[in-house]
Image (cartoon, rainbow, N blue to C red):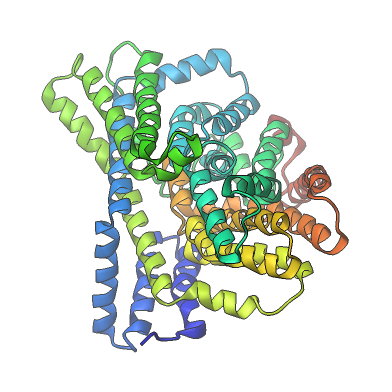
Amino acid sequence: MEVDYGILAIVPPLVAIVLSFLTKRVLVSLFLGIFAGGIIIARGNPFGGIAYSLDKIVLSLTDDWNAKLLLFNLLMGAGVAFIWKLGGSRALTNWAKSKIKSRKSAGIGAWLLGIIVFFNDYVNAAIVGNVFRDVCEEYNISSERLSYILDSTAAPVATFFISDWIAFQISMVQTGMDVAGITEVSAFQGYLMSIPYNLYCIFAVIFVGMLVISGKDYGPMLKAENRAITTGKIVNEGASPMMDVSYELGEPKDVKSSLFTFFAPIIALVAVTLFGFWWTGRAGGNNLTDVLGASDPALALLWGSFAMTLVGILMALRVMDIKETMDTFLDGLKLMLLACVILVLAWSLGGVTGDMKLADYIVSKLGGAISFGFIPVIIFILGMLISFSTGTSWGTMTILTPIAIPLTYKLTGDAVTAVSIAGIVFSGAIFGDHCSPISDTTVLASIFSGADHIDHVSTQIPYALTAAFVALVMYSLYSFVGVSIYYLIPLGIILLYVLMNVLSSYYSKKYNIDSKTKRKY
């Protein structure tokens, strides 16, 4: 018999999230969140709670998808280690000195590369982080700023272009259409119709560009950037970066630096990952969308990271003996140990919230009988809450899409409106994913930027909230005033620009950032 945990279902993620911000100790906070859920499920029995918690962690480790992603992260660390030790990062920094002449051009470069690498959010964070981590350090750009650029381009961009994300989203649209009994349009057509309604992702990517081009900041990010500019410290005092390459690996070998050393492993990563998408999904049909839908993204990523590491080993053997090569490989694995532990605990906490039916509870409380005018706003807010609490955008899409499409179709009788509403689900889901400290994509952004995880989350939240606020205003105008979504996109961009300037001016005065410092931005 299923147990209804009611409002208690919110306790595990609440404990983890609150403690993460209060203590800045993510591992302890995540475990205590899991243990809190275990205690509740075990009806107050602490031994039962411990047994349940350990069981959840084991299940997270042994899950096929999770295991592949853990190995992907470990091998990525090994690949990064070879790039560093062979002087690839040093070569890129030297090249950047001749090509990138300012902090602004470095930020714009990271933003543009984040848009170009659109086929997977994990690979996006890995590539852009590896390419620009040393460049940003050279130009005193804070690790918080780089992690924000990584996080707020990776998933949003992947939702719009050819990637494993759109294959998943199309399948969610199909599920919602099946529940609603919609046959007038195909799932792919429905996905295309939903794109303009995915306002948060549109605004998030554009807002990154606004900030890096203007050099304006506000909130905690303003302090972080001011610290980096005035002191040269790209990480906060007392911070614990998720990946500190120079500390863990030591100085690069005294060999001639080459851009080939940097790009060869990354090209191998990209090429083999793309091949993996095709190979694992080739049985799905000849259509690109069908191939993506049938592919195994985790396996493709694993193949890509293995190829990256293998290329690194082959290059290393030209200038290292076997012992030094293997030592570099093991040091690379160690780079990712903390990140892997956080991912396992985050997945475990997600399993706890699933067992306690947190999403069902939220939907039942906020999704009662209402008119269509409230549907877009409520769906967006529900997506934000569920994703923030559970740390998974895909899980949120899985929960809400089959509810949103049939509910909208029932209220409007219009298939186009019903399938388009999926874009609002995707929008809310990715917002929550950006803001949640227990989100895997947020963790990966911290890893590859070398940022302290909580510092990344706390500096990104004000920017994510700004983009979400603008999206919420636009959804309200769409719902209650009837303004076309195509007019709301440019209107929202204008509002973003205004808010950026107003908030930047306000926080510059609040933090007493002088004009000389601001000119350096």
Residue at the spot x=61%, y=40% of the render?
A: 225
Left or right: 253 in relation to 357: left
In the rendered image, the vertical position of residue 4 relative to residue 393, given as above or below: below
Quadrant the N terminus occupies = bottom left
At which x and y percent is residue 456?
A: 52, 49
Tally the numbered discs. 0
In the rendered image, the vertical position of residue 76 relative to residue 11, given as above or below: above
Residue at the spot x=60%, y=65% of the render?
A: 180
**Residue 456 seen in this snapshot:** no
Residue at the spot x=48%, y=60% of the render?
A: 395
In the rendered image, the vertical position of residue 255 relative to residue 406, given as above or below: above
At which x and y percent is residue 521?
A: 68, 33
Residue 177 lies in quadrant: bottom right
The residue closer to the viewer here, 174 or 477, is: 174
Residue at the spot x=38%, y=39% of the render?
A: 281
The residue closer to the viewer here, 481 or 457, is: 481
Residue 75 lies in quadrant: top left
**Residue 126 seen in this snapshot:** yes
At which x and y percent is residue 398?
A: 50, 61
At which x and y percent is residue 195?
A: 66, 46
Left or right: 495 in relation to 45: right
The residue closer to the viewer here, 213 or 314, is: 314
